[in-house]
Amino acid sequence: MDVSFQPTHNAAVRVVSRADGIPTPEVFAVTRGPIPSCPEGGLLIRVIVAAVDPAMRGWVSRERNYLTVEDGAVMRAEAIGEIIESRRSGWGVGETVFGVFGWQQYAAVMPSDVYWKIDVEVAPAPVWLGTLGFNGLTAWFGLLHFGRPKRGETLVVSTAAGAVGSVVAGLAREVGLRSVGLTRGADKLRRCRETLGYSEAIDYNAPGLDSALASACPRGVDIFYDNTAGPIADAVFPLLNQGARVVQCGSVSVPNWRDVPQGPRRERDMIVKRLSWHGFVITDHRDSFPEALAHLKRLFVAGILDAETDILEGLDCAPGALQYLYAGRNRGRLCIKP
Amino acid sequence: MDVSFQPTHNAAVRVVSRADGIPTPEVFAVTRGPIPSCPEGGLLIRVIVAAVDPAMRGWVSRERNYLTVEDGAVMRAEAIGEIIESRRSGWGVGETVFGVFGWQQYAAVMPSDVYWKIDVEVAPAPVWLGTLGFNGLTAWFGLLHFGRPKRGETLVVSTAAGAVGSVVAGLAREVGLRSVGLTRGADKLRRCRETLGYSEAIDYNAPGLDSALASACPRGVDIFYDNTAGPIADAVFPLLNQGARVVQCGSVSVPNWRDVPQGPRRERDMIVKRLSWHGFVITDHRDSFPEALAHLKRLFVAGILDAETDILEGLDCAPGALQYLYAGRNRGRLCIKP
């Protein structure tokens, strides 16, 4: 922030209608209002960078979801911000914090809205929204806790080059897994192979997905870290080995769940292959965060984890950001600089 | 066995063709041959009672399965038998044993075909094929290990009055679960409520399954012990609570898996409800058998576990036994007295 600049208003993105499927720009409106004042016992935050997440689709959808942003409210978003006013001891002006500050320029929050303080000496602010934020924690917990990886096993990751997938790839390399990434387009395939360190990368949109997967996984699949569901999952299931683990982290390939889509029944595979299938939401697992973050920081500093970020400039980009994300146009963790 | 009767031949049921779906009598043929001689280092067994199991469908099907009985071979079956000749120290004539002896009157086996010796003072022979055999072990391991039950939770069991379900019901009562059994027909409903001790029993063939389930599970479902898959599972999934466990023990409602049937995709439920879904085959978990069997025996002797058996007389009943089983006509553990 230019300290000589005295801000006069707060721009914010509000939810104005419910989404069916992938949220279109009409779901949101950019509004301008006064800068909020710092609440009694709270903090005033200048938002440095805010996240754009696949999970946001659920927050604004018409369907039942674990979390909903009501019409008229500022769009919920994780963000990194600087404390510019504090009315709470223990929280100092100038400190950088990670929390739920929304798609807006200024946020008046209580300390309960803040997850934790971050250290911009370890990594720049956007990295704390991704590799060292919930994406990294999600990758860490899903792969290490539910995936129970053992050196030499084969892992398949869908949305392999995404914010979570790219961290899964780094962790897989550290454990010593054979990792196969599913993504699309020449750029991301190259990124998977050259930057993220997948053993193999496959374009799931190219013809012959089944045979490409089969030849990339000559010893079958022991762990399927699934962010997509749908036909991509259907291509992986037949390759699962006895005792394989399926980690259900996302379901981005399914445009809407109001009319639950049909797919092949899994019950027989569950039994014959003795599968374990786990769905999870990372915020249930706070007890693991200190251990996970310490591990992720160590790997990031050692250069083992990639942390590419794709930053949209200005809140006017926000209403179209989820379409951009679901179209797979971002490279690395997608954020908005408000 | 009448000791004055000198047997002259061995009747056996052989597999003569592959089954599509539920095996019809034509899949099997009853053959007669000489009584086998006791092998070097082995045992000659007189079969007292042999099991009829849902899993047998997979053993004779055209589809890939974890276990196959080839054409021409004696049908594989667990059985209780008496050692009538022994050429191995540690195994005495007159001892009663549990093992894989097949649908036949006499079996020449090696000790590796025997699971363990049984004690007919604790329970009659057929009970050792069910409640105190793999059915009981399956119920025990599935419910207690994968189901992770806690007092006061709600359990739904499909094929509630079957050989596994009836033991699940007893264990559920001991843990202090609210248990809801799905079965069909007035007899089995009564058996579920009066003998097995389910809190509620529902006829899954009656109209209004969804609303009957909803009112039987006012606090949702924490554990789904599923033996059926298919539409019955589809009725239970919407009631699953956050953190619920699905134990996939069988899939008897699906007549064949060669063309995998379609069903509602589960990925969204997996995530939003943080589900754990486990498939298993009990023979993978031998390490738990001593603890499980000791526990089951204690509960059986205390009268807490039901052990009804339905015994078909003579091997001529065997070819039609799987149709009888899949039609749900048996009451309790189905066996054949060869």
Image: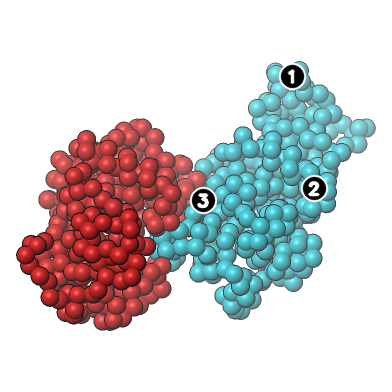
Chain colours: A cyan, B red
Residue kind at label 3, given as amino acid type: His
Quadrant of res B151: top left
Q: Check residue A278 in the rendering and tell me which mark sits there, or answer none.
A: 3
Mark 1 and mark 2 lie on one chain; the one further toward the N terminus is 1
Give the residue number, with chain letter if any, for mark 2: A300
Residue kind at label 1, given as amino acid type: Arg
On the image, the x and y values in percent for residue A119 come to 82, 36
What secondary structure is found at the residue carrying circle 3?
strand
**Position of residue B337 in the picture relative to residue B128 (left or right):** left
What secondary structure is found at the residue carrying circle 1?
loop
Q: Check residue A182 in the rendering and tell me which mark sits there, or answer none.
A: none
CA distance separating discs 1 and 3: 40 Å
Quadrant of res B85: bottom left
On the image, the x and y values in percent for residue A163 come to 70, 53
Would you call the spot at circle 1 few (<14 residues within 10 Å), some (14-19), or many (20 or more)? some
**Position of residue B191 in the picture relative to residue A5 (left or right):** left
Q: Nearer the viewer, residue B153 or B286?
A: B286
Mark 1 and mark 3 lie on one chain; the one further toward the N terminus is 1
Task: Identify the residue shown where x is 19% and y is 53%.
Answer: B125
On the image, the x and y values in percent for residue B182 come to 25, 50
